[in-house]
Image (spheres, rainbow, N blue to C red):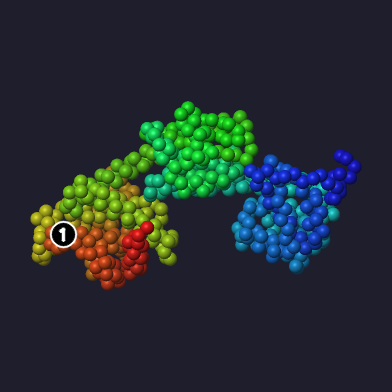
Amino acid sequence: MEDGLDDNWLIDDAPDEAVPPSQEPWKVLIADDEPDVHSVTRLALRNIDYHGRKLELISAYSASEAFEIMSQQQDIAVLLLDVVMETDDAGLRLVHRIREELGNHICRIVLRTGQPGQAPEQEVIVSYDINDYKAKTELTTQKLFTTVISSLRAYESLNALENHRLGLHKIIRASSSLDHIQSLRDFASGLLRQINALLQIGMHGSICLAYRPEAISTENLQIIAATGIYEDLSRCHALPPEHEAHALVQRVLQERHHIHADPIDTLYIVVQEQLEFVIYLSPCLPLSEIERSLLEVFCDRISLAFDNHWLHEQIQGSQTAAVSLLSSLADGNCPEQNLQQSLTQKKTIEDFCLFLREQPGFENVLTGRFIQQIGIAYLLHDLGKLTVHSQIRNKPATLDEQEQQHMREHARRGSELLVAARSIEGASQFMSMAAEMALYHHEHFDGSGYPHQIKGDNIPLSARITALFDVHHALTSHRPYRERWPDQQALEYIANAAGHQFDPLLTEAFLRFMKKMAQPL
């Protein structure tokens, strides 16, 4: 080692190098009430470069100021923290607030103290979630350099793990999503996070695009996910022809393979129905050959995942179409004319449940699985009407008492049919819900309904929701014995029946939802 170089905080007069605009610096927060400590720390650290990124040194002169900065900037990598500031234990209190109040367990905290006796090392290390402990007298330039670099390395690894966790979370969420294009977007977004986390290449920028070979217009080259500097493209329907990525993406689609051309890596994936995907990456650092090979292997896995996703969507679509046709028959209508209406009803009730989940009291009740099943289950709630004679179903006058009793049997009979169908392997997931909806959707909240006269929360939630949509649909549809009601009249009927026929809390949410749906976009 050169004389004095590693032991003197103040020796380092090399000019500052410009930070490359494409590489964001690591943020290091200096929290100390002594201005001189800030000065010498800045001199010692000003030319540090780790993985091609400089440091951004931020100063706080009190624990409260440091907490405010940490609250506003979630990407502080390292905190160099003094113990004694406003109070003798201000630094220790700040550690607790960062970890507990902010829930920030990724930032690396290095405790620096000029009074070791005030905060004994062994006691502090055991009692507080800090990552290093240094007396100011032992922090030479070299030791400070080593401490900061090791802290950045740990922060980088933890941050990569967090990105990995977020990616998995989005993919899991996508698998139970109801809307196809939203599901595809979430899935693609999760994959971009996975790729970035896999190679620790940062979230500087990446785009995932979908394309069909028969398309002759760039309008069919759809952007389904984007990150970093490309995030604004998420709002675009297609990649603009003038965009920097356009030419390279077109080349990838023409040649049908990956293209690595520093500083851009472009990945090609083909899945079911000849749907093609291009992932356009702009990593902060050039990828090594091993990293590129790993990416290509990972793309093969992505292709299988997309295939499985596509097949799942196809099965769901076929299932929904079959149930919709059955629903139209049960309602006594022409299947060809009412298939689209059934699909609209399914989507509307799913959207209502998503809306309801945001309302107080329903956050933890409406699970993703519940919402995924209720739409298709709703289409079967009147299946029992198939057992009612058509002369009764289509009678153009009020039913007599005997006919009414026969009609009311449809709830029990429909439930029995669905319970029987539930025994078929693979059919139990939504058939159970459909059976309870069929049996209980004519029960009234005050206990005056049928067939069992149960009331209140004893009526399953799925049936209480179904009751609202069933009555609204019946009132606003033409029937042999009456004309359809205007929508406003139907909603007034439902509002007046809250607490008697319908769950009052659900009714209130239903009316707000229908008002929202009626508003022009």
Q: Would residue 43 appear left or right of 318 to someone viewing this image?
A: right
Is residue 125 visible in this depiction of the protein? no
Seen at 65% across and 45% down, the residue is 21
Q: Could you tell me how many numbered marks the image carries? A: 1
Quarter residue 71 falls in: bottom right
Seen at 23% across and 64% down, the residue is 486
Decide: is 308 above or below 45.
above
Under mark 1, the amino acid is Arg
Q: Would residue 352 appear left or right of 20 to someone viewing this image?
A: left
Seen at 19% across and 62% down, the residue is 484
Q: Would residue 154 appear left or right of 185 to someone viewing this image?
A: right
Q: Mark 1 sits on what residue?
A: 479
Find numbered disc 1 in the image and state the secondary structure of the residue it sits on.
loop
- Residue lying at the far right in this picture: please name it: 3
Decide: is 510 above or below 380.
below
Indicate the position of residue 185 as horizontal and vertical percent values: 45, 45
* Few, some or many residues within 10 Å of mark 1 (<14, 14–19, 20+): some
In the foreground, 362 or 32? 32
Q: Quadrant of the C terminus?
A: bottom left
Seen at 64% across and 43% down, the residue is 22
In the foreground, 234 or 133? 234
Is residue 148 visible in this depiction of the protein? yes
Indicate the position of residue 426 as horizontal and vertical percent values: 32, 43
In the foreground, 468 or 212? 212
- Residue lying at the far top in this picture: please name it: 255
Q: Quadrant of the N terminus?
A: top right
Indicate the position of residue 425 as horizontal and vertical percent values: 31, 42
In the foreground, 283 or 173? 283
Indicate the position of residue 272 as horizontal and vertical percent values: 39, 34
Q: Would residue 396 appear left or right of 470 to someone viewing this image?
A: left
